[in-house]
Image (tube, rainbow, N blue to C red):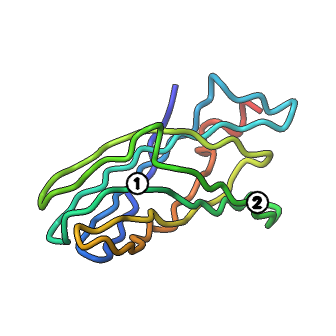
Amino acid sequence: MAIETPTYIEESFGYRIEVRTEFDFMRSNPLQGQYLFQYHITITNVGGEPAQLLSRLWHIEDAKGEVRQVKGPGVIGHTPHFKTREVFDYSSFCPLPTMSGRMWGHFEMLGSDGKTFEITTPVFRFKIPEDFIDRY
């Protein structure tokens, strides 16, 4: 069972990033301090130059204020190319040791001119819905 939160949106360099998050009740284990959150990202070239997504950098902050970074090539094994109006959707997950947190970052893009640029993501939040707190 998962309950969705609001959509978080950011635009930069002609690219729009929309993020939705969910708490994954069935795959979390609060007795061991493990809370799993899913996030769903839609990247749309709304008028930016054609480009390829090369890598991502995430900053993940838990409710204790501890921040860790995750950097890697592509997203979920893909390095999509974007022409104008093209869209790429993907889903992933974020394990946290606390019942809430937040995440933000950027995607490094390679433009058709051979130069790289970064499109930023919104800051998006993870939080256990109130309905679930009594169950823990």
Residue 7 position within the rendered picture, expressed as x and y whole percent measured from the top left: 37, 56
Residue depicted at 59% across the width and 60% down the height: 58
Residue depicted at 32% across the width and 76% down the height: 12
Q: Quadrant of residue 51?
A: bottom left
Give above or below for 48 relative to 92. below
Give above or below for 70 relative to 36. below
Residue 124 tag number: none
Residue 86 position within the rendered picture, expressed as x and y whole percent measured from the top left: 16, 52
In the image: residue 29, left or right of residue 3: right
Q: Nearer the viewer, residue 18 or 3?
A: 18
Residue 88 position within the rendered picture, expressed as x and y whole percent measured from the top left: 28, 46
Tag 1: amino acid: Val
What secondary structure is found at the residue carrying circle 2? loop
What secondary structure is found at the residue carrying circle 1? strand
Say few, some or many: other residues with alpha carbon within 10 Å of mark 1 (under 14 / 14 to 19 / 20 or more): many
Q: How many marks?
A: 2
Please report whichever mark, 1 or 2, sits nearer to the chain's N-terminal start.
1
Give above or below for 126 relative to 110. above
Residue 41 position within the rendered picture, expressed as x and y whole percent measured from the top left: 39, 49
Q: Which residue is mark 2?
A: 63
In the image: residue 135, left or right of residue 93: right
Q: Which residue is mark 1?
A: 19
Nearer the viewer's eye, disc 1 or disc 2? 1
Residue depicted at 81% across the width and 63% down the height: 66
Tag 2: amino acid: Ala
Say few, some or many: other residues with alpha carbon within 10 Å of mark 2 (under 14 / 14 to 19 / 20 or more): some
